[in-house]
């Protein structure tokens, strides 16, 4: 049983947010990234995605499909998307906790399918996989998430990682990893 006064379990009573990140790839292994205009992470890059409509009972899969349609302008059927990771970020930027469901579109996307490259959230860019870490991405992505997800792309399996952002240094641990071996 945890001590309710132990700050490791609830740093500063921050609110929790639930969101999805969606990874869309081209045939030549470029990732669709959003150069963000808005909070969180303005002027940084991230995969497309957004907060779940919890009050509507939206599921993670529904949210992923909605966000892909809203941000990339394409419809993805259920059979072409799969959740491949879940990330819990505690005390992100000392503002909130995040529970992130990461989805991968299993078919390759032709960039010509996107009807636009710019909208109110920012600008969409196709980034070669080896250049992602050189972009201005959030610290949790640079130090933990991208190094774990990059080798797992297209590999199948599932990853669950916890990232504690409440201290001076990020502390992370892999809770589950079912990546196929070999």
Image (tube, helix red, strand yellow):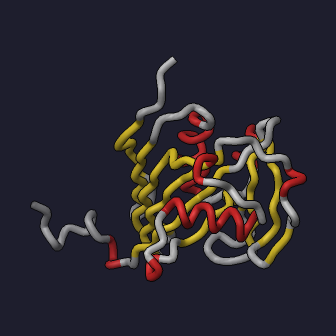
Residue found farthest to the bottom: 55
Q: Residue at x 44, y 60 (%)?
A: 89
Name, please, the residue furthest toward the left.
1
Q: Quadrant of residue 14?
A: bottom left
Residue at 74 percent of width and 47 percent of height: 31
Q: Is residue 82 visible?
A: yes
162 left or right, relative to 119: left
Residue 71 in the figure: left or right of residue 166: right
Q: Nearer the viewer, residue 50 or 10?
A: 50
Residue depicted at x 57% and y 41%? 149
Residue pictured at 80% horizontal, 37% vertical: 27
The N terminus lies in which quarter of the figure? bottom left
Residue 139 spot, x, y in % from top left: 58, 56
Residue 104 visible in the picture: no
Count of marks placed on residues: 0
Q: Is residue 130 left or right of residue 83?
A: right
Query: Taking 25 as reference, is 152 above or below it?
Result: above
Residue 134 in picture, x, y percent from top left: 75, 47
Residue 113 against residue 179 in the figure, above or below? below
Q: Quadrant of residue 5?
A: bottom left
Residue 69 pos. (x, y %) = 71, 66
As rendered, which of 103 and 144 lies closer to the eye? 103
Q: Residue furthest top?
A: 182
Decide: is 66 above or below 22: below
- In front of the other: 64 or 159: 64
């Amino acid at each position: 049983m945890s001590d309710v006064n132990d700050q490791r379990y609830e740093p500063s009573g921050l609110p929790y947010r639930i969101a999805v990140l969606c990874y869309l790839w081209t045939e030549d292994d470029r990732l669709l990234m959003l150069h963000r205009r808005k909070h969180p992470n303005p002027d940084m890059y991230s995969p497309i995605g957004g907060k779940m409509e919890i009050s509507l009972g939206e599921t993670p899969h529904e949210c992923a499909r909605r966000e892909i349609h809203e941000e990339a302008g394409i419809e993805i059927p259920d059979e072409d998307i799969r959740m491949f990771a879940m990330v819990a970020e505690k005390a992100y930027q000392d503002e909130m906790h995040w529970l992130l469901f990461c989805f991968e579109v299993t078919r390759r996307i032709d960039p010509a399918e996107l009807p636009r490259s710019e909208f109110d959230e920012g600008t969409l860019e196709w980034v070669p996989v080896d250049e992602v870490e050189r972009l201005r991405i959030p610290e949790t992505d640079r130090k933990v998430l991208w190094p774990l997800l990059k080798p797992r792309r297209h590999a199948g399996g599932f990853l669950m990682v916890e990232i504690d952002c409440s201290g001076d240094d990020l502390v992370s641990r892999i809770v589950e990893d079912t990546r196929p071996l070999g």
